[in-house]
Amino acid sequence: MREDDEPIVVEQTYNTPIDVVWRAITEIDQMRQWYFENIPSFEPVVGFETQFDVQCEDRHFLHMWKITEVEPLKMIAYDWRYEGYPGDSFVMFELFQQEDVTKLRLTHQTTKSFPKDIPEFERESGVEGWTFFIQKSLKEFVERNKSSSA
């Protein structure tokens, strides 16, 4: 992902109230079920930081997140970097109530280019990953749990 790339934008509509989706993207126990199971902690509070390792083949990617903006039930954004690799980006989850469904727009914008010789840092890899998380994993999670989350 390069700083001159278009941002990655993935949208999905969920057949569930906005508070159910908000909890899924901000509460650690729920995030571990659809997002990254090894997130050690998470708080939707500006300035909060967390980090966790993801292994891909023989490489480790220590994800380093720092919350930069929070508007409860509307938006959360965080700085997203990897220890030991140049590059920086931010991720923003925006929620919109549309009648009896919730729309989520995920934007991942690179602000400082990541190494171009590592496949996991290619834009296509990011598109594929975010499409999986937002349109499959999160969708299945919130729609499966909407009745028990109310």
Image: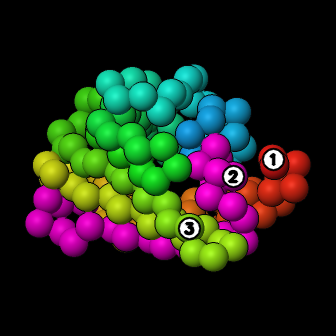
Which numbered disc flags the more N-terminal residue, 2 or 3? Answer: 2
Please name the residue shown 81% across and 47% down the image: 149
Please tell me how crowded label 3 is: few (under 14), some (14-19), or many (20+) other residues with Cα within 10 Å: some
Seen from the viewer's position, the closer of residues 31 and 147 is 147
What whole-number distance in Å separates the C-alpha atoms at marks 2 and 3? 11 Å
Q: Position of residue 137 (x, y in %)?
A: 67, 60
Comparing labels 2 and 3, the label whose residue is closer to the camera: 3
Residue 27, magenta (yes or no): no
Q: Amino acid at mark 2?
A: Val
- Residue under label 2, please give it: 20
Q: Position of residue 10 (x, y in %)?
A: 45, 71
Q: Would you say 20 lies left or right of 4 here?
A: right
Q: Position of residue 9 (x, y in %)?
A: 37, 70
State the image quarter where residue 135 is shown: bottom right
Is residue 94 at all visible to an observer of this figure? yes
> What's the mark number on residue 97?
3
